[in-house]
Image: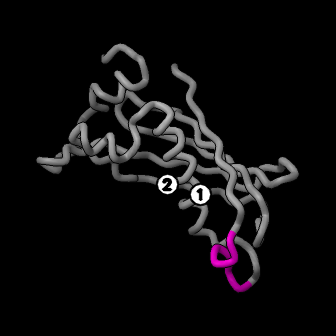
Amino acid sequence: MIELEATVEVLVAYHDCDPAGVVWHGNYLRYFDKARCVLLDKINYGYIEMEKAGHVWPVIDANVRYLKTVGFDEKIQVTARLEEYEYRLKLSYQVHNSAGALVTKGMTVQVAVNKETEEMCMGSPRVLFERLGIEYV
């Protein structure tokens, strides 16, 4: 299995927080997306490249586990890690605060959909394997 991960730093903006002064729960999915985009760019298969290759990759499942709160003006590190790629893209995420404590973790699952026919592919397209440097199965 190929190991691929990417980490981004995010400075929590005021508008990301709820009235209690902590990051609103839905914003973690945006943070996950930032890390996912960096990870996909590492293999030159970001969203623009996906579409050029004839596919879109909608998120079909997401899970977030909140362990500790994060507030305005805190710096967090968000790491995305590729867990599966053969039939779908499954990524895991970890969010750490500036002290290094794990504050949130989660996962997303995406599937390839043919952009022209709008049909879900039964496996990941050949181009993903090529970008990963893996023989197509």
Residue 98 falls left or right of residue 119: right
Q: Name the residue under label 2.
A: 62
Residue 38 lies left or right of residue 69; in this view the side is left
Q: Residue at x 52, y 39 (%)?
A: 39
Q: How dense is the environment of label 2, judged by Cα within 10 Å: few (below 14), some, or many (20 and up)?
A: some
Question: Secondary structure under badge 2?
Answer: strand
Q: Which residue lies furthest to the top in this view?
A: 135
Name the residue: 76% across, 50% down.
Answer: 96
Q: Considering depth in this image, is 41 or 59 the residue closer to the camera? A: 41
Looking at the rendered structure, which numbered label has been put on residue 31?
A: 1
- Label 1 sits on what residue type? Tyr
As drawn, is 74 to the left or to the right of 60?
A: right
| Percent position of residue 128, x then y | 35, 29
Residue numbers of the magenta segment:
13-19
Extreme residue in the bottom direction:
19
In the image, residue 100 above or below residue 71: above
- The foreground one among 57 and 41 is 41
Task: Please report the residue visible at 17 percent of the width from the left and 46 percent of the height from the top.
Answer: 119
Mark 1 or 2: the one toward you? 1
Mark 1 nearby-residue class (10 Å; few <14, some 14–19, many ≥20): many
Residue drawn at x 67%, y 80% is: 18
